Every structure is written in structure tokens, then in C-alpha cells.
Amino acid sequence: MLKTPLNLLDAAFLNLDTRENPWSVHVEVRVEGKFEAEKLVKAIHAAALAHPIARARMAEHTAVATVYEWHIPNEPEHLALNVVTAKNLAEVEAARARLQSILVPLSVSPSFLCTLVHHSGGDYFMLNVSHSSGDGMSTFRLMQSIMRHYAKQADPVAVDALTVRDLKALAGSQSLTERIERTKIFLDYLWRAVTPPVRLASKKGRSTGDESVYGFKLLAFNPKETAKVMTKRVKPATVNDLLLAGLAHTVKEWNSLHAGKQGRISVMMPVNLRPAEWWHDTFGNYSSYVSVSLTQDEQSSLSESVQAISRQTAILKEKGGASVLIDLLDIPKWLPAALKSRLRDIFPVASHNLVESTLLSNLGRLAEFPTVGSAGAVKELYFSPPAIMPLGVSVGAASVADEMFLTVRYHRDQFDEGAAGEFADLYRKILTD
């Protein structure tokens, strides 16, 4: 059996993962036809064999252990595929919410769960990947492997995942100059955090009896709509800068409509640390987090906010801001497990100032899937990061060919379904009007 330590990000997510706030990473596809469950299980099995960390399980550890370890069996220990037949889209939504609200058990292999939903408008295949084992790009890469194996297509893997696990070697400070620059970025973040970020105004109705933690609203932009969104981007701003600014303005407008607070709005975003040679490859945690924020003066118009965020992201890229977290996580890595697990208790206390208003994760422009055998073409692809409290809402973005797909994920403690729909519609309106 292969063994490898959890990397710095694996361990951080493990110590924050709870049933009330599961760090589940979601990806799903809708095809034009029908999946055959038996063939799909074989494809899942083949994909798990291709990605060692995807089929890993946590080794038992004591309270004084300083290192967590993945054990990687030669074969996955279970590949249960939950199969649901949905009469309507509401039942598809319920299946999605149930799956992504599960805290993925890490004591057995693999570290992901999957659901197949048969629907008259085309089948949905959904993955819930534990963030302790993989990031957003990992979920896409795993889905890509499954679809390729189902279609009997080649699925080359760029690098041996077990040889590129050291995040400090990959992205940590390599010189005193780098460390000084990154320390400046961190001190600037702490200075901004003196002013607590705005919290999204909550809107909840009477409980419907739904026990799921998360709900989802999907926004598909056809080629014409996508092109319209892109007209709002003025270089050097990127599409990601536009989506970040649009989300910040959605928070501002939502709070204005629902008696929420106005002020500094901060948005967290993951940044891919993979090198260009395997940018879209390799299952594991290789995405660090950074924060951008807008003062009230920078929120007067969407175009001004886009440029303000563009200036911040340019500095973060130039100075290696995404690697600051790697340096910070390296400091307490030798603490015993009992103390590391206390992060779950500390997190709510620190969240008032240090947790952002919301989160956006953008996978960027992705490779198109092949026609998936008898299941036909992939018509839609949706992805979303966790929406833990007090964030309450997160947005996942993915672009395929000339279409863009956004997923608004919300915590049930933040919104009811109606409010989530209003928020998603407001985001669409801000991006397209």
C-alpha cells in the first residue's frame, strides 16, 4: 500500500471540516442522453486508479501525532453509485443538495461520493469531493477522467501526483526577499481586516423540513449572453476580475434591498499553484487562497470596481500573494493533532474580521468533453466551492467553449430557496445589464 503525508492545505481543510459546514467541492455534468450505471461504475473505478489521492483514505492517528498520512490502497474500497430517478428539476435539485451536504468520510477509500440522476431532459452525474483531498481543479480533472473512460478515450496523466506533494517546495518562499514581500502582503491584509468586512444580509423563511446544509442555483450563459458579459471587461482586467467585482456589487445591492450593512466588501478566491505544464491536471490540493476587497469609495460603479480589483490581483500575482498562505500554514505544522483540531473552535471567533464577505472560485476556460458514448454530448458543466458560514454564499465559475456556467451555492442558515433565487438573479442582472 502506498503512503504519503497530507500536504499543508489537506491538513488545514481537514481541521476545519464539520458536519454543519462540510468542505465539499462540487462538480456535475448534464448529458443529452442517458448514462448506463454499470458502465459509469467501471469508469469511476478507472478514474480512481488514475489518481492516487482520489482513492486515498486517512490513516488512524493519535492526539499527539504531528503528521497526518494518506494510505492509498491498490484498489478503491467502495464505489457505491447512488442512482436517482427525478420526475422534475426540483427532484434533481434535491439530489444535488443531499449529495453536497454530506461530510465525505475519509476513513474509507475513495475520498469522493457520486450520484447519477436520470432525468427526461438528460442525465446528471454529480461528484462531491472532500476538500481535504482535492481542490476545484481536482474535481474537474476527476470528472474529466470519468467521462473519458466512459467514452473509451485515452486519459493521459501529466505527472506522478505522489512526486509533487511538497507545497513549500512548489510555492513557499525561496529567498529572504520573497519572504519580506509576502510578509508585506499579509500585514496589508491584517490592516484591512481591522475594519470588519460586510456580512451578507440573511433572508430565511419557514423551514421546509429539508435537512440538507447547502442549496444551489445554477446560471447558464449561452454564447450571446456570455459575449455580453465580456463587453464589461476592460483590459488589463481579467474575466475573473469582472466576476469578482460583479459578486461584490451583488452583495452591495442585496444588502441595500434587505436592510443590510454597507462598507468594505471582501471576496476570497482560490489561486491555482500548479505550474503551466500541469495547470489543469493532477488531483490534490494545489490552490491557495487570497482576498480582494472594495472600500465604499470603490463601489460607486461596476467599471470602477473592476479596475480596483484588477490593480489588487495584479499586485498579488507579481508579489506571489497566493503563496502567503503556504508560508503561514508551514508554521504550525508540527503541532499535535489535538491542538490542530481546535481550529474548528477558534474559527467562529476569528471569523468576524478575518473571514471574507463571500467567495468566488473560477476554473477558467476548460477543455471540452468528448461525446460520452451513448450518453451523448455534455451540455452543461457546473462547479462550486464550499459556502461555509459566515460566508453563507459562494460562486463557482467554469467556461466551456463560448458558454459560461455559474453556480451560486448557499448555506441554509443564510438563505431560503426563494432568497437564493433572488440573489442569483441579481448577480445575473449585474453581469448582463
Image (tube, rainbow, N blue to C red):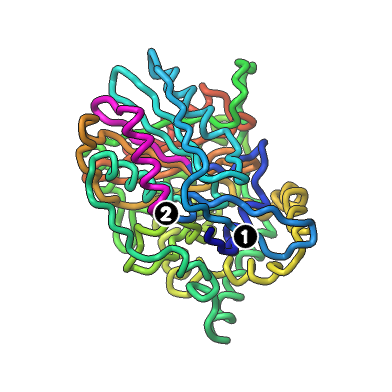
Image location of residue 176, percent across then percent down = 57, 86
Quarter of the image holding residue 40? top left
Give the vertical position of 416 relative to 300 (above or below): above
Which three-letter amino acid code belongs to the residue tagged 1?
A: Glu
Q: Secondary structure at mark 1?
A: strand
Q: Can you see residue 252?
A: no
Residue at the bottom extreme, as displayed: 176
- Bounds of the magenta span? 26-50
Numbered badge on residue 51: 2
Left or right: residue 36 versus residue 289 is left
Name the residue that disc number 1 marks. 69
- Based on the picture, tell me whether residue 412 belongs to the magenta stretch: no
Q: Are the residues tagged 1 and 2 within 8 Å (C-beta)?
A: no
Image location of residue 118, percent across then percent down = 35, 21
Which three-letter amino acid code belongs to the residue tagged 2?
A: His
Q: Along the polypeptide, which appears first: circle 1 or circle 2?
A: 2
Image location of residue 347, percent across then percent down = 72, 50
